[in-house]
Image (tube, helix red, strand yellow):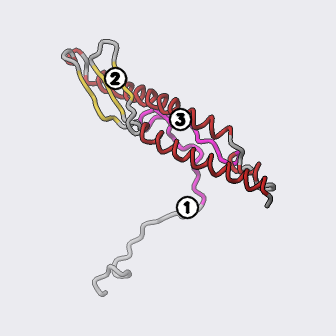
C-alpha cells in the first residue's frame, strides 16, 4: 500500500473511533429517556422508559369517574403513546450519528468487489398494537407440512410404562 492509502485508512480508523465515542455518549443519554402520555383531563398518566416499558402509572383524584374498562383502555392507549414519544426522542438523539454514518464511505466502497451488505438486510414489519387473539394476529400463512396423524390406541401391557418393566 502507498502513503495515500495508509492516510485514507488512518483517517477512516480515526473517524471510526470518534463515532464509537459518540455512540457511547448517545447510549448514556438514551438510557435516561422517558416518554409520558396523559389523558386530557389529567386523570391518568403513563410513563415508559427508553425501551418502552411502563415505569410509572398515575391516577388523579377523580379516577372513580372512569369505569374499569375505560381505565384499562386508557392505560393501554397512553402506554402506546408514551412509547411513541420515547421512540421520537430516541430518533432525534440518534440523528446526528446517522448523518455522520451516512457521510462515511461504505465498506463495499472501500474494498472493491465486496457486496453492499446493508442493502441486503430485510426490513422488519411493523409491530402490531392490537390485543392478543385479534384477527390481525392470526397466522393464516402458517402451514405445517410434516404433520403425522395420531391415533390413540390402548397399549396396556405393551410399553415401557407397563409394570413388567
Question: As drawn, which residue projects farthest toward the bottom?
Answer: 164
- Dot 1: what SS? loop
Cα distance, mark 1 to mark 3? 47 Å
Residue 22: give x, y in percent of width and height.
52, 41
| Residue 138 part of the magenta segment | yes
| Residue occupied by mark 1 | 147
Q: Nearer the viewer, residue 148 or 74?
A: 74
Residue 127 on the magenta span: yes
Q: Quadrant of the N terminus?
A: bottom right
Residue at the location (28% across, 31% down)?
56
Number of the label disc, if any, that sits on residue 94 = 3
Q: Earlier in the sequence, mark 1 or mark 3?
A: 3
Q: Residue at x 36, y 33 (%)?
A: 48
Front-most of residues 106 and 161: 106
Q: Is residue 61 left or right of residue 69?
A: left
Seen in the picture, residue 78 relative to 23 is either above or below; the reply is above
Start-end of magenta stretch: 119-145
Magenta portion: prevailing SS class = loop
Total numbered labels placed on residues in the image: 3
Image coordinates for residue 5, horizontal then vertical, percent: 77, 54
Which of the two labelled residues, at mark 2 and mark 1, occupies the earlier sequence position? 2
Estimate the spatial distance between the alpha carbons at disc 2 and disc 1, rounded to whole Å: 43 Å
Amino acid at each position: 500500500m502507498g502513503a495515500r492509502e495508509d492516510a485514507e485508512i488512518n483517517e477512516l480508523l480515526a473517524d471510526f473511533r470518534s463515532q464509537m465515542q459518540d455512540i457511547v455518549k448517545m447510549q448514556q443519554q438514551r438510557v435516561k429517556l422517558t416518554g409520558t402520555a396523559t389523558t386530557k383531563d389529567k386523570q391518568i398518566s403513563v410513563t415508559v422508559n427508553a425501551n418502552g416499558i411502563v415505569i410509572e402509572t398515575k391516577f388523579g383524584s377523580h379516577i372513580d369517574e372512569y369505569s374499569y374498562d375505560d381505565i384499562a383502555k386508557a392505560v393501554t392507549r397512553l402506554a402506546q403513546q408514551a412509547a411513541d414519544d420515547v421512540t421520537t426522542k430516541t430518533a432525534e438523539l440518534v440523528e446526528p450519528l446517522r448523518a455522520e454514518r451516512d457521510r462515511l464511505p461504505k465498506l463495499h466502497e472501500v474494498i472493491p468487489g465486496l457486496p453492499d451488505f446493508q442493502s441486503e438486510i430485510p426490513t422488519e414489519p411493523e409491530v402490531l398494537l392490537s390485543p392478543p387473539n385479534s384477527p390481525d394476529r392470526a397466522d393464516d400463512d402458517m402451514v405445517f407440512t410434516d404433520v403425522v396423524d395420531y391415533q390413540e390406541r390402548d397399549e396396556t401391557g405393551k410399553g415401557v410404562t407397563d409394570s413388567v418393566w
